[in-house]
Amino acid sequence: LKHLVKDTVWVIHHEAPDRKGQDEPARAEKAGSYSDPITRFLLALYTEMDYDDAQRELQSCEQVCKGDYFLAGHWAEFQENARLLVFESYCRIHQCINIEMLASKLNMQPEEAELWIVKLIQNAKLDARIDSEKCRVVMTKAPPNVYQQVIEKTKNLAFRSTMLVSNLEKGEKKDGN
């Protein structure tokens, strides 16, 4: 059973481009039902936001993947997706990121990390620019989507309408009595 859980976690991590549902393995591990480097990596990344622990677990994941018959040939893809997860998670929190520090979090050399980030920017997976003078990545904020703005503005409309009707009815009862 534990191999099935490990393989399921790997598939979720490897195959889910939209990253939805990846905290489920972390919830299962946190509940104490199963623990291995892959689930601990996701737990450190999504629940604890501990990037140092996530990096240590990612190094342990290499041993697990290379030692597993079904996962052995997919370590490079797993590592690339894991790095992308760490990077996306880190970028949600920070606006300016030192490339050397980021390279250490991704278990890469600074030059390798900079090239990797350039490729992400070119492939439009990242809305950022590289400040070469200060050796950092500067995240740019995308203008809000018009659709999202409409959703945000109308989110409480039903509640406010109900409250307005309720207050009007209370006012009518007071005037009528």
Image: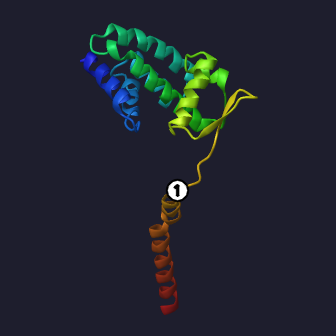
Rendered view: 166 above or below 94: below
Colouring method of the image? rainbow
- 28 sits left or right of 176 in the view: left
> Farthest right residue?
133
> Farthest bottom residue?
176
Rendered view: 172 above or below 166: below
Q: Where is residue 149 in the image (x, y as percent from the top left)?
A: 53, 60
Q: Where is residue 108 in the image (x, y as percent from the top left)?
A: 57, 16
Q: Which of 154 and 104 is in front in this view?
A: 104
Residue 16 appears in the picture as rendered = yes
Rendered view: 11 above or below 107: below
In the picture, the quarter occupied by the N terminus is top left
Q: How crowded is mark 1: few (under 14 residues within 10 Å), some or many (20 or more)?
A: few
> Farthest front residue?
122
The number of numbered badges drawn on the structure is 1
Q: Position of residue 30 (x, y in %)?
A: 41, 25
Residue at 53% in and 64% down: 153
- 9 sits left or right of 100 in the view: left
Q: Nearer the viewer, residue 128 or 16?
A: 128
Q: Where is residue 23 in the image (x, y as percent from the top left)?
A: 41, 33
Residue at 58% in and 30% down: 118
- Give the residue number, with chain letter if any, for mark 1: 145
Dot 1: what SS?
A: loop
Residue at 52% in and 56% down: 145
Q: Nearer the viewer, residue 169 or 89?
A: 89
> Farthest left residue?
1
Residue 177 appears in the picture as rendered = no
Q: Picture quarter containing residue 32? A: top left
Q: Picture quarter containing residue 96? A: top right
Q: Which of 137 and 20 is in front in this view?
A: 137
| Amino acid type at mark 1 | Asn
